[in-house]
Every structure is written in structure tokens, then in C-alpha cells.
Image: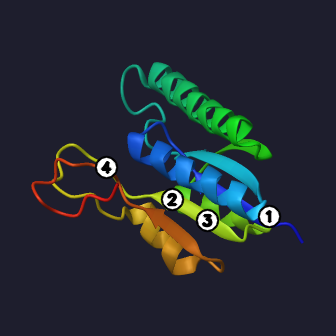
């Protein structure tokens, strides 16, 4: 049985860091990597003017994030599958992990400029709570935490 690494990605710097860790892990253990981008539903569904345009931008960002991971995989010689789903983020991650037989799920901490420290977001917490395989939560590598934890 081949190991399968699932990385959940978005267009955030924190997600790109998680993708780098996932690609390195997959390369080290000879695993296939599945890059999954989930666009949450209900957030903009016609509720505000310009929602259609914003949804197009979200789709483009997801495509760009997946292409970034595919490029990382190509450089590392890792087999990669890119997938985009729509729905409740944690549920889609867990369902896809089950579907592909993921042996580990890699996710990022939330990195928001308004927070002094990165934190585990609600979707990651849900995945941690209900996952049946290990979940690797990658911390954000920043040096501007005023002396707080900043790996790297």
C-alpha cells in the first residue's frame, strides 16, 4: 500500500508553508500527494453586490494555489493530484481523505495579520476532532511575534 499525503491548501502564505512541508514529507516517504482546495459554500451566494465576481476570484485563487503545489511536487519528483471541492471545508477534507485513503492530512495554522500569534482555526479543529488518520498542523514561520514562538 502506498502512502498518501493530503494537503489542504488555499492562497495564504501559511497554506503555502504547509504545502512545502507536505511535499517534503511525501518525497521522504515516497508517497503520492493530493492537494485539495475547498471553497466554502454559502459565504457569498448572492448576498452582496459583486458576489459573482468575488466567487470567480476565489476560483482563480484556488486554481493558482493548486498549481503552486503541483509545481512544488514536480520539482521534488512527487506524484501529485490536484482537486477542488465546494462545500463545508472540514467535511470536504475529511471525506476526500477517506476517499483517497490518506495516511496523513497536512494543514496550516491560521495566519492573520491582525493576530499576534498564529492559531489553529475552526476548520482545522474540526478535522483534528474527526480525522481517523494523523493530522499535521504546520505552524507559521514568522519572526515578527515579538519574541514568541517562531520556528524556522
Residue 105 got which mark?
A: 3
Residue under label 4, please give it.
111
Badges 2 and 3: C-beta atoms under 8 Å apart?
A: yes
Label 3, secondary structure: give it: strand
Residue 140: give x, y in percent of width and height: 35, 53
* Contact check, label 3 and label 1, Cβ < 8 Å: no
Q: Which of the two discs, 1 and 2, sits closer to the camera? A: 2
Residue drawn at 73 percent across, 36 percent down: 74
Q: Is residue 127 left or right of residue 101?
A: left
Residue located at (73% from left, 67% from top):
102
| SS at badge 1 | helix
Q: Which residue is mark 1?
A: 99
Q: Which residue is mark 2?
A: 107
Cβ atoms under marks 1 and 4 closer than 8 Å: no
Callout 2 environment at 10 Å: few (<14), some (14 to 19), or many (20+)? many
Q: Measure the C-alpha gap from mark 3 to mark 4.
A: 19 Å
- Mark 2 or mark 1, which is nearer the start of the sequence? 1
Amino acid at each position: 500500500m502506498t502512502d498518501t499525503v493530503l494537503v489542504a491548501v488555499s492562497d495564504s502564505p501559511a497554506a503555502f508553508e504547509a504545502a512545502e512541508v507536505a511535499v517534503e514529507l511525501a518525497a521522504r516517504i515516497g508517497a503520492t500527494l493530493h492537494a485539495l482546495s475547498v471553497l466554502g459554500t454559502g459565504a457569498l451566494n448572492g448576498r452582496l453586490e459583486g458576489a459573482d465576481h468575488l466567487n470567480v476570484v476565489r476560483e482563480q485563487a484556488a486554481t493558482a494555489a493548486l498549481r503552486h503545489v503541483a509545481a512544488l511536487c514536480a520539482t521534488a519528483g512527487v506524484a501529485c493530484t490536484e482537486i477542488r471541492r465546494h462545500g463545508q471545508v472540514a467535511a470536504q477534507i475529511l471525506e476526500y481523505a477517506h476517499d483517497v485513503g490518506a495516511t496523513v492530512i497536512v494543514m496550516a495554522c491560521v495566519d492573520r495579520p491582525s493576530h499576534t500569534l498564529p492559531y489553529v482555526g475552526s476548520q482545522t479543529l474540526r478535522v483534528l476532532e474527526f480525522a481517523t488518520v494523523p493530522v499535521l498542523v504546520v505552524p507559521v514561520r514568522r519572526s515578527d511575534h515579538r519574541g514568541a514562538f517562531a520556528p524556522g
